[in-house]
Image (cartoon, rainbow, N blue to C red):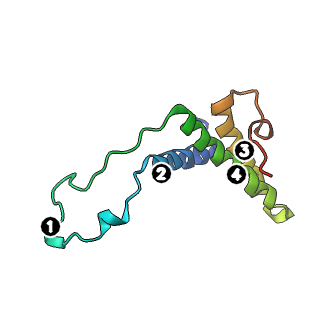
């Protein structure tokens, strides 16, 4: 990170955001209906909900999905004009997979292909 590796920074920021989203508690329709404004909870933290605790396996699944998305997008960018973006997406996927699998693993080895 000290070398200001843009691919690593981008990949890690988006992975953290994806993990943050995975921890969010879905809001049900029942919670949104029927509460008059004057009866709505007020004050600091009144509308806060406890976040979900992700298991280690779930965290790994979310990060692998982020890497898979990048590799899939890189494959779709086949035009020469998009070669730079494709390379950046592959580099980001490699960063994420290195965190999961170690430094000797390539992106293509770690992400299962979808049928």
Task: Determine the secondary structure under disc 4.
Answer: helix
- In front of the other: 7 or 68: 68
How dense is the environment of label 1, judged by Cα within 10 Å: few (below 14), some, or many (20 and up)?
Answer: few
Q: Nearer the viewer, mark 3 or mark 2?
A: 2
Q: Give the quarter of the figure containing the N terminus.
A: top right
Q: Can you tell which quarter of the image residue 86 is in? A: bottom right
Residue shown at 42% from the left, 38% from the top: 53
Distance, label 3 to label 4, CA atoms, is 9 Å
Q: Residue at label 3?
A: 91
Across and down, in percent, residue 67 comes to: 67, 45
Distance, label 3 to label 2, CA atoms, is 23 Å
- In front of the other: 67 or 35: 35
Q: Is residue 94 left or right of residue 1?
A: right
Looking at marks 3 and 2 on the same chain, the residue that comes earlier in the sequence is marked by 2
Distance, label 1 to label 4, CA atoms, is 45 Å
Q: Residue at label 1?
A: 39
Q: Are marks 1 and 4 in contact (CB under 8 Å)?
A: no
Task: Determine the secondary structure under disc 3.
Answer: helix
């Amino acid at each position: 990170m000290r070398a200001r590796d843009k691919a690593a920074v981008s990949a890690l920021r988006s992975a953290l955001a994806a993990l943050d989203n995975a921890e969010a508690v879905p809001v049900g329709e029942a919670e949104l209906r029927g509460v008059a404004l004057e009866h709505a909870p007020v004050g600091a933290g009144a509308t806060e909900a406890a976040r979900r605790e992700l298991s280690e396996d779930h965290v790994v699944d979310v990060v692998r999905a982020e890497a898979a998305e990048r590799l899939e997008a890189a494959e779709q960018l086949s035009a020469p004009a998009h070669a730079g973006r494709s390379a950046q997406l592959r580099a980001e996927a490699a960063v994420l997979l290195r965190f999961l699998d170690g430094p000797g693993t390539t992106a293509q080895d770690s992400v299962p292909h979808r049928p």
